[in-house]
Every structure is written in structure tokens, then in C-alpha cells.
Amino acid sequence: MNQPDADKLAKLDPALTHYYPDAPVVNEAGWGPAPGILRALLSGEPRDADIDWRGLLGSARNEGIINFVTFRALQAGLTVPGEISQQMRHSLMTGEADKLSGDFELARIFAAADEAGLRLLLIKGEALARTIYPSGACRPSGDFDLLMDTVQLELGEQVMAELGYTPGAFEGVHMFGQRTWQGRDQGRPFVVDLHWDLTNRRFFRNRLSVDTLLDRAQQLPLPDGCAWIPTARDALLIACVHLAAAKPHMPVDLRWLLDIFLLLDELEQAQFNALVAEARDTGLVDVLANYCGLADRVLGPCRHRGGILELVSRIDPARKRQYQRCCEQRWYDLLEYGRRLPGWKQRSELLRQTLPYVFSRLGRSSDGPV
């Protein structure tokens, strides 16, 4: 890193936390030795003497990166103590079997969707596991996140029901951006989050066009079929929005920053520039800057570091305060979201869904739509 970049990053460090202004600083102490090992593995310069394997095992497992660390350590020919090596290899093999089982279920879902004329997009962890990671097992995830257009919601629910999935509660398309479905195939349980927007957090809803994401999608081959996934450029913005829209005091998992680091590595300069331009147009450039900057600080240096640092230096405090206000004042959040809806018909529907939901939550402790 040249000195100007080093000076700039040093000044920005305290600001790179959750996008929500009052959220605590990321819990780096709780990560243990994992970030240091990751940095060494990502830079291609790991040394056996620098690794506390026993300490790493616990922290890497907690952060969901144990299989990635195992894969890279084996690839680098590092010497891992016998008992710890067995545990790490077992976790990797179990993860690979789990992903293979998931491949067949994904193929089943996408085949049914294709037959019904339903456009689906596999997003977040399960899509990244099968693209930017050296093995699907290196990116664990507890569910399949599937994105569709709101106009196909009824068809999407019909397809899931015909596949044997059971739906969770539904409060209305404006109250939440997803609905959870649970199913079982050949004895194994599966969870699907069927999304019609990228997040439940209204401040970030209706900013990225689902139609555009579907139109730009690329095909993912599977052992018994195929799925559709976002481009790396779209996946990076989705990953940053996912982190920013989390509950305000939810810690940043190391695996999410690793997603961002690896996605940045996939982008050529022209793609990065196009991403920044789109983020500006959709009001998401500060979110992109914040989490790319955080990934660079924790795991860096990232690809496109110069551009990232420039974006971070221009994060708008007023926009962060607006987001804080939306998080803390539900009616302000509701009005800000309603303002972006196209036409009064949808705004009246928002009000129709909101009133019963609010009355149903009276006297109950909840963070509400996030």
C-alpha cells in the first residue's frame, strides 16, 4: 500500500462499522485469530509458525469460515496438528455432501419453476458458495434465498406448495420482502426464503429492480439441471445491502466480509465502475462504500482498493442519519418507503396492510420488518 492510501485508511478506520450509525463497532475481539489467518491465506503467504490452530478452530467455526480455511490450508500444504486436521477435514467433507444434496433440491425447484413459467434467482450465500468459492462447502448457509418479481408471487407460492413446501406467516408484500417455506426431500429438511425484494428493511426496498436483476442473470449448471444467479457485480451490491439492512445491533459475521472480498476480486475495472455508477443512481453508494471498506480493513488489501477508499471518504453523514431515523421511527420509515412506491394505488395498499399489522403487534416486543 502506498503512503497516501495508508494515511487515508488510518483516518477512516473508526468510521467503518455497521452502516447504522449507532450500531456497535464490529466485534473484532470475538473473531480471535481468524482474521489474521484469513489475511495470510488470501495473500498467499501463510506460515505454519504464525497459526494458533486450536484457537483458530473455534473462532473459524463460529464465523462460518472453517471449511474455507481448511481448503486453503490444505492447498498451501500447511502442517495442521493431527487431531485438529481430522476435525477440519471432517467438516469439509460433511459440507461437500450437504452442498451436493442441496444441488439436487435446487435443480428440482428450478425445473418446477421453469415448467410453470416462474422466473427465479438464487441469491446470497448459496449462490456465492457455488461460484466464487473454491468448493461449495467453503460457504455454509442455512437456507435457499430465491428472488422473484412481485407480480409472480401467487405463481411462486403455487410452485412451492406443489413441491411439498409449507409456508410461514404472511403479512403482505409491503410489510415484509420475503416469506419462509419449509420442506423435506428424501428425509432431509430444506428451508426456502422466497423473496420479492432484497430485504425487509423498507429504507432499502424498491431500490434495485428485480426485473433488471433477472434480466442480467447468468446460468449456474447443477448435477441434475441448472439454476439462475446474479452477476458478480449484482451479487456484490446485494451482499452490501444485506449487511446494511440487518438488525442494528447484529454483529458482522466474518464470512459476510469474505463474500465481499471475493466478489471484489471477480470484478474487472469496467465492471467496478459500472457498479459504482448504479449504486449512485439507486442511493446505495454509501452502503457499497461502507462494507467494501470494512472488508478491506479486516481482510485487505481488496481489489479496487483505491476506488473503495475514495468512496468511503465521501460517505454522506446526512444519509446515515436518515437511515438512523428510519430505524428508530417506524412512521418515518413507512412514509419514506411509501414516497418511493409508484402511484397511489400501491400506497393505499401499503396503508391497508399496515394498520392490521400494527394492531396485531400492540403489546408485543418485536423489531418489526427488517
Image (cartoon, rainbow, N blue to C red):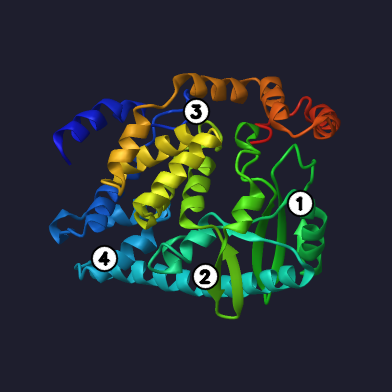
Distance (Cα) linking label 1 and label 4? 41 Å
Q: Nearer the viewer, mark 1 or mark 3?
A: 3
Sequence order check: which comes first, mark 4 or mark 3?
A: 3
Q: Residues within 10 Å of mark 4 (few under 14, many from 20)?
A: some
Residue 91 falls in image quadrant: bottom left
Are the residues tagged 1 and 2 within 8 Å (C-beta)? no
For marks 1 and 3 on the same chain, the one whose residue lies earlier in the sequence: 3
Q: Earlier in the sequence, mark 1 or mark 2?
A: 2
Confirm whether residue 342 shows in the render.
Answer: yes
Residue displayed at 26% across by 65% down: 73
Q: Quick one: label 1 or label 4, which is nearer the N terminus?
A: 4
Image quadrant where one finds the N terminus: top left
Residue under numbered circle 3: 20
SS for dot 1: loop
For residue 143, say whether it is visible: no
Of the 4 image quadrants, the one containing the C terminus is top right
What x and y, as percent, mark residue 233? 47, 52
- Decide: few, some or many residues near mark 2? Use Cα within 10 Å; few <14, some 14-19, many ≥20: many
**274 or 312: nearer the viewer:** 274
Give me the C-alpha separation between circle 3 and circle 2.
33 Å
Report the disc number at residue 73.
4
Nearer mark to the viewer, of 4 and 3: 3
Which amino acid type corresponds to the residue marked 3 in the rendered image? Tyr
- Name the residue type under label 4: Ala
* Disc 1 + disc 3, Cβ < 8 Å: no
Q: Amino acid at mark 1?
A: Gly
Residue at image mark 1 = 168
Instruction: Decide which of 61, 234 is in the foreground and name it.
Output: 234
Mark 2 lies on residue: 99
Label 1 with label 4: CB-CB less than 8 Å: no
